[in-house]
Amino acid sequence: MNPRCGSSTLQPYSLQPPAYPPMPTGPFSAADLFLFNEGTHVRLYEKLGAHPCNANRGGGAVADGTDFAVWAPNAARVSVVGDFNGWTKDRHPLKNLGSSGIWEGCIPEAISGTRYKYHIVSKFNGYEVAKADPFAFHTEVPSQTASIVWSLDYAWHDAEWMATRGKRQSLDAPVSIYEMHFGSWMRYPNAPGAERPGEFRSYRDIAPRLTEYLQQRGFTHVEFLPLMEHPFYGSWGYQTSSYFAPTSRYGHPQDLMYLIDYLHQHGIGVILDWVPSHFTTDEHGLGYFDGTHLFEHADPRQGLHAEWGSYVFNYGRNEVRAFLLSDALFWFDKYHIDGLRVDAVASMLYLDYARKPGEWVPNRFGGRENLEAVQFLRTLNEQIYANYPDVLTIAEESTAWPGVSRPIYVGGLGFDYKWDMGWMHDTLEYMRQDPVFRKFHHDQITFRSVYAFSEDFVLPLSHDEVVYGKGSLLTKMPGDAWQKFANLRLLLGYMFAQPGKKLLFMGGEFGQWKEWNHDAQLDWDLLEQPEHAGVQRWVDDLNRTYRSEPALHRFDCDPNGFQWIDCHDSDQSTLTFLRKGGPEDPDLLVACNFTPIPRHNYRIGTPIADHWQEILNSDAAIYGGSGMGNLGGVTTVPVASHGQPVSIGLTMPPLSIVLFKAKK
């Protein structure tokens, strides 16, 4: 047995397609089978799974029924069981397509809406199991686990968005992402007499509510935590069972299409979290699929993620790579999504991730790098951009792996962006400090400038930081209630002022007190309180300014767009810097005061002798602040400071960030 493939049935490949048995009535050509076994077929969802029977079967008219096809190379027998045959395992066997490992057959009795599974008898030890279809387009609502025959026909109305999204998502465009968990954003009310108290809202029901909310807040994109079907709701979708089916908890596939279509028609992009790093161990899923470790490594040191209780994909197996590549393209093709955020990339890159010595297998050079995973990620990005050059791929990668967002031809992984996890952790740790002690931790707030342009970054304030006892963003902040809100506004303003695209998890935009609970909706009633409404208004204006001022987004990923004025004033816990636009764009000056002590006539040097207009002030009364500011702006005086020939004397309100715009 090949320990890297978990199977003894793999055959060496020639440069020509092997001589498979002729299949005049089936959906597969010899080229399809060859490309699948080679690992380069990236449209497997058009072949495997459940589809209307081939129009030319037998040379006649279109046949009724459904053609089923599944990969199970180590099965002795495969049959389809379902509603149409009383779940009887021997009535509808599939035929084996030679050494391809694929079993296929047309069943006239199976129609749209039919529930089904594959009954598999393994060649080994008589193992029998009923498996959901790895390529199913629709599933039963968990905890039920059957697949459902389903068409993905849908009439889209988002042509304008699709034609322009490339410009909207370029490196020099404003990208501000609202991250959300669908099931806990907004539910039906629990009020007496409510129609469906506490239940999930559907994809269609959420569509106009979410779209209007995102437009009011000014976000450019929404990112959904994984919507692919998952048996355990509490996994938030990160323990996937059906990679080609959106979860049925919120409706049918066309309902999700409607939601994405609706968002597109109103100028909102859609990013899906995607999990090619590990998958659920539930019996009906991909694990031990045909009585062998087909999708995962057989060796638990490679195939089992002990920390998460899940299986790890075998990236060295051709058919597994083809499965994952096809899945990535599927969501762009059939659901018109605009980006994939790839989860837990670090766990893919390192063979010793979350493992102790002796619990992992080195690569062929003796190192800890997962060479097959590296090649898979590069191929993934190559295939996505070859087919959809105007979309985004974003890596959640928590280490210093070089070149995550750099082109493949220079040795990078080829992602558009990488989450800046270091910035998130350092900044939150700094903001937790009592302002009295922040001067001793000043490097945490400035260290990012050392590496800020080594990758193209998204600055996340994500879901992972507001669960498991970590508290909400608001409760992380020190001080009394007023100081907590002021600190939160300062934190959010600092994120928007820094170079990099933005991501904020739901609830942070209005100062949710409670940490995120996936079993309840957000505390929307908090918006009746002026402090929370003020934070929301602040986020609205941050997004508006970020989108309207080129200096805040044009050079998000270019060092030419950022310049420190003073990053060394640790004693007063202040930071001042410039954000620069193009030749015709006015520069912005940013001043941050991380203490509750106002700084009056705080002198900083500027490169421009002119008037600087105050355009945003987190301490303004409309946001819940004290109302301290600069009376609309300040004018330079011929006093040198910070290496500049002129300077201004600012008022820096307590626990605040203030933005000024230069005249040009």
Image (cartoon, rainbow, N blue to C red):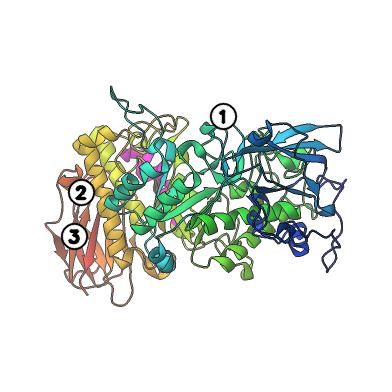
* Disc 1: which residue: 143
Q: Secondary structure at mark 1?
A: loop
**Nearest to N terminus: mark 1 or mark 2:** 1
* Disc 3: which residue: 614
Q: Judge from the rendering whether residue 511 lies leftward or rightward of residue 2; answer left or right.
A: left
Amino acid tagged 2? Pro
Q: Position of residue 291 (x, y in %)?
A: 79, 37
**Camera-side residue: 197 or 362?**
197
Q: Tell which tag, 2 or 3, sits nearer the viewer.
A: 3
Tell me which residue sits at (26%, 66%) in the image: 605
Q: Judge from the rendering whether residue 477 lies leftward or rightward of residue 559; answer left or right.
A: left
Amino acid tagged 1? Ser
The extreme left residue here reads 631
**Camera-side residue: 389 or 405?**
389
Q: Is residue 539 magenta?
A: no
Q: Secondary structure at mark 3?
A: strand
